[in-house]
Structures are given as structure tokens and as C-alpha cells.
Amino acid sequence: MAYVITQRCCNDASCVSECPVDCIRPTPDQPEFATTEMLYIDPDTCIDCGACVDACPVEAIYPEDDLIDSLARFRDVNAAYFQRHPLESNFTPIVTPARPPKELGTLRVAIVGAGPAACYAADELLRRADVEIEMFDRLPTPWGLVRAGVAPDHPGTKTVANMFESAFRRETLQYYLNVEVGTHISHDELLQHHHAVIYAVGASTDRRLEVPGEDLPGSHSATEFVAWYNGHPDYADRTFDLSGERAVIVGNGNVALDVARVLTADPDELAKTDIADYALDALRQSTIREVVVLGRRGPLQAAYTSSEFLALAHLKGVDIVIDDADLELDQASQAALDDPEIEPSLTLKYTLAKEYAAGRRVDGNRRIVFRYLVSPTVLTGADRVESVEFVHNELVDREGRQVAVATDRTGNIDATLVLRSIGYRGEPVGDLPFDEQRGIVPNEHGRVIGADGAPVPGVYVSGWIKRGPRGVIGSNRTDSEETTEQLIADFTMGRLAVPEAGRAALQTLLAQRRVDLVDRAGWRAIDQAEKAAGKSAGRPRVKFTSREDLLKAARG
Ligand code: NAP
């Protein structure tokens, strides 16, 4: 019997170093790691020891004999990877990185943000140095998109927070939640109290379509909708009109799939999750029967991962609908599909689309409809969205990438709710340099680079603000390791100014400013209260969704 990695894989590769027979691929040092959808276990080499199961922070690994129906196909998905990439020993002895010399004293680091990139950076620093970490977040709660982004029906993915929670038990890491850098404390003050600052602030806004009608009532960004149903206090007062029959989602990445699932899910199933109560009430009243997902490129270029696409097949009461005509491939895509060197995950994407196209429809079911090679050109309606006009595209090769180019064929589709799900976008961070086009802080391996091309001393970035909004939660692990590597090297080489003041002075400063900060005890009180409220209802937690309630719980 072998172990099998399934849909929830977060790519953080914790399992890789635990495997005694080195049978998990790709490994972080392989080029394929940067683009892989997930990690895979070679069934022929696995010795069934289960070491990877204990290491996985998101409970994504199962013995093959225990795979439930909805995950059974991952047995073949794991095996197919090794048919394409036969296992070669990749064994390189793990070298424990050198710790900074003791005489340098304690390294003090401020981390701005408390999401996965911040947490992986903190975890790595705690392992690698004698360090004091102060972790700041403008929200009264930690975990960033693990709390406010991961879909409520993916509870396993959220278990990564347990790993951070136990790694951060020691006093060496302090939480400064509900503290906004730039408002309550400045960047210069952070540098006065620390050797270095790591910004792991993510990508807080969304990209725009730039088509007429985009700002009509009824048209929103998916990022807003996601933050709303996840109970983010800044979005709790938003309203979404769910009184129509059809919603259109523009873009077909994994966020689009999350939103399509939430819109079509049985509310009784959502009631078992940590979805915000007000969102559950609104979804119970929803009359939306059909969600149409518009992709500007073809089925082979779709941005969703094959594992998330596969999971749609197991939604109760929902048909996945694709018109076979939409799956006709242009010459280049057909050649890519026929190439024996094609990645199995890509073949699976197309196979699944074909299966959905041939699937049986059930009267009364809700529907998620996938359309390909279409781009919205205008959203129309008298005083709110009523219709999406679109143009059909064709694919053209531009420097090896298949890009969508509009044809003169047009169409339209009636919808009362339009959610654009075309990617997150980073915002400028204080006075740090900013690359407007990419929405990131310019950096080299995590060291922030100034306008003169030289590193800005003591300032680093990690996560989406460093590399752009792509990758799953665990992708932040290798990203953060790279950043902390630079930071520790700079500390060891004496490139970081010794802070003028330490932790006690920082706490005095924040107390003088009467900042209503939430510390470890405060967060623990919130966490326990939310979990207690969920327990009687059989839910993982019932979230507080306003700052007032969160702060009250923190004090309680
Ligand atoms: P994404 O994966 O980058 O997808 C963005 C989508 O928007 C693509 O289909 C893209 O098409 C399309 N798009 C971009 N500009 C457009 C335009 N002007 N007009 C029409 N379409 C446009 O982004 P995302 O869905 O926001 O996800 C962000 C990251 O989070 C991804 O790495 C994703 O995998 C990850 N995530 C993972 C999970 C999970 O594992 N369950 C859940 C949520 C998010 P093109 O491909 O043609 O550019």
C-alpha cells in the first residue's frame, strides 16, 4: 500500500524532507517545483511508513486504501506524475544552515503581516537564529488569507494555522495585532527597534477589467465577495444582490472556482463550516441557479488547477456544464495535448473538461457552466448590471505563450451579478519603492531594492508583495526561506544597524499611543470564544465579524 497526496496539497514541501525513501516530488530544488500544481508520491517506492502524513500541515495525505470516493482518482494522479518524471534519487544531504555567531547577540525582526508568508518567515527565523520577532497586523486576528481567503468548504487547508500556532508558543515571538504600521507606528520607528523589517503584507486589492459598466451596481470583485463570506471585518457590511437567477464570474483561476462553489453550494452544507453567519443567511435566500465562469483562453490554458477542477465533480446538487464545441482545440493547443512530454496535470484538465461536457444533467440541480475563449467587453443595464456583452477570442502565440486575441464574433449573456476574478493586486507599502506594473515591491531574493539599484538596508519582503499574487499557501514556505536567508546573511555580515531600543521600549511606545493592541492572550481569547460558539452548532468556529466584537472577545 502507498500513501497518496490529494487535492488539498499546499506545496509547502514539509513532507519531502520527512520521507525516508525520498519518493516525493518535485522537491524544492527542482525546476518543476516552481510551477507544479501539487506534490506527488511515487507509489512504487513508498514504503508505507506514514512519516509524510505527520509532516503535512493540511491533512492532504492518505493511505491509498482509505481514499474516499471523491479522492480516489488521486491514486492515478500521483502515479501519472512518475510515468512522466521517473523517480531518480535526488538525495542531497540536508545541510543545517549556519546560525549567526553568538557574539552578535539577539537578532530583532519586525514582521508586518500575519498571513502565511509572514508565518513561514517567522517559523524559519525561529529555527535559524537567536531571534526576537514582533509580528504586526492591522486586523485583530492572525493568519491573513488562511482566515479571510481560504474557502469555508476547505477546512483542511485551514489546519495549517495549527502548525503556526504551535510554532509560535514561545515568548520569543510576540503578536501586535490590531496595530497598523504607518498609522500607529512608523516604518522608521520599526527600524529603531529592530535590526530588520520584513513586509509580508500580501496583495490587498484586485485587478480591474477596464471595461465600461464595470462599476454598475451588481458588479463586484471576487476578492470582495471572498472577504465578505469569510467574515473579514472590513467587508462585513457589503451587500451582494443574490436575487437573480444567474451570476457571471470573469476569470477561471482557483478563486473563481471557490466563488462558484459557494454560490451554488447547499446552504445546509455551508452551515457546517466557519462561513460568516450573515453570508450564510444571504445564501439561504439566494435564487441564483446558474454560475457561468468565463475564461479568456482555452480549456488547456485555464488558470484553475486540475485538482480543484476535479473536486467540482463531487459537489452535491450541482451539474458542471461545458459545451463540447468549446473544447475544440486550435492547432497549437492540440499539438501541446498530443506531445508525449505533456505534464499529466494538463492532460487531466482537458480530460475532465471532456467528461463534464459528456456528463448527465439532473433536473433541478444548480449549474456551474464553463465557457472558454471569451472576454467581456461591456457590462450593461439601466441602473444595475443586467447583461454581459463579450467577444470570442482566438489564441495567438506571443513569445511562446498562448495569448487571447479578440475576433469579430460577439455574444451576450444575461446576469444580475458579475464577479471579476482576474487576480489580486499588491498596493504600495508606505514609502517603499513600488513596481506599479507588477504590483510588487522591487526586490532581489527578498531584499528590497531602492531606486538606485542598491538594497535598502534592513528592509525585506516575502509572499505576494514580493513575487506577485500566485501560488498556494505552502508556496510561501520556500519564498520565505529565501528572504530569511538574505536577512540572516546581512545580519551575520554586520550589514544591519543595531537597533536603538528593544522590546520593552516598543511596548512602552505603543502603550503611550493608547493602541488597543491584541496580543497572544487576546488572540487566544478570541479563538477560544469563536470555537466555543461553533461547538454547539457542530461548526469549527463561529467568527466574530466586526472589530468591536473581536476586541470585546480579546478583552474577555
Ligand atoms: P489566477 O489563478 O491568476 O487567475 C486569474 C484569472 O483571471 C485567469 O483565468 C486569467 O486569465 C484571468 N484574467 C486576468 N486578466 C484578465 C482580463 N483582463 N480579462 C479576462 N480574464 C482575465 O488568480 P486567482 O484565481 O485570483 O488565484 C490567485 C492564486 O491563489 C493562484 O495561484 C491560485 O491557485 C491560488 N488559490 C488557490 C486556491 C486553492 O488551492 N484552492 C484557492 C484560491 C486561490 P489568463 O490565464 O489568460 O491570464
Image (cartoon, rainbow, N blue to C red):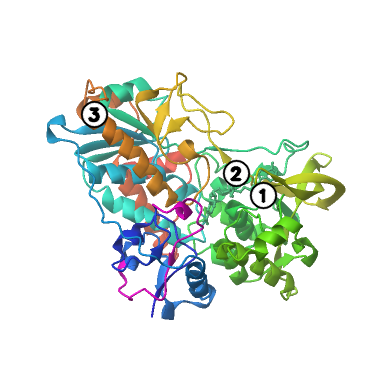
Q: Nearer the viewer, mark 3 or mark 2?
A: 3
In the picture of the structure, the residue carrying the numbered disc 2 is 423
The numbered mark, 1 or 3, whose residue comes first in the sequence reads 1
For ligand 1, tell me if the residue under mark 1 lies within 8 Å: yes
In the picture of the structure, the residue carrying the numbered disc 3 is 493
Residue at x 46%, y 21% (from the top left corner): 431
Crowd around label 1: few <14 · some 14–19 · many ≥20 (10 Å) = many
In the picture of the structure, the residue carrying the numbered disc 1 is 251
Q: Are marks 1 and 2 in contact (CB under 8 Å)?
A: yes
Q: Position of residue 53 (x, y in %)?
A: 34, 67
For the image shown, how many numbered marks are present on the structure?
3
Looking at numbered disc 3 in the image, what kind of residue is underneath it?
Met
Crowd around label 2: few <14 · some 14–19 · many ≥20 (10 Å) = many
- Which of the pair 71/142 is nearer the observer? 71
Where 38 sits versus 352, above or below?
above
Q: Position of residue 92 (x, y in %)?
A: 29, 56
- Which of the pair 156/335 is nearer the observer? 335
Crowd around label 3: few <14 · some 14–19 · many ≥20 (10 Å) = few
> In the rendered view, does 363 fall on the left or right side of 480?
right
- State which region is magenta: 29-51
Q: Nearer the viewer, mark 1 or mark 3?
A: 3
Residue 49 in the magenta stretch? The answer is: yes
Residue at x 76%, y 46% (from the top left corner): 375
Looking at numbered disc 1 in the image, what kind of residue is underneath it?
Gly
Looking at numbered disc 2 in the image, what kind of residue is underneath it?
Gly
> In the rendered view, does 81 fall on the left or right side of 128?
right
For ligand 1, tell me if the residue under mark 2 lies within 8 Å: yes
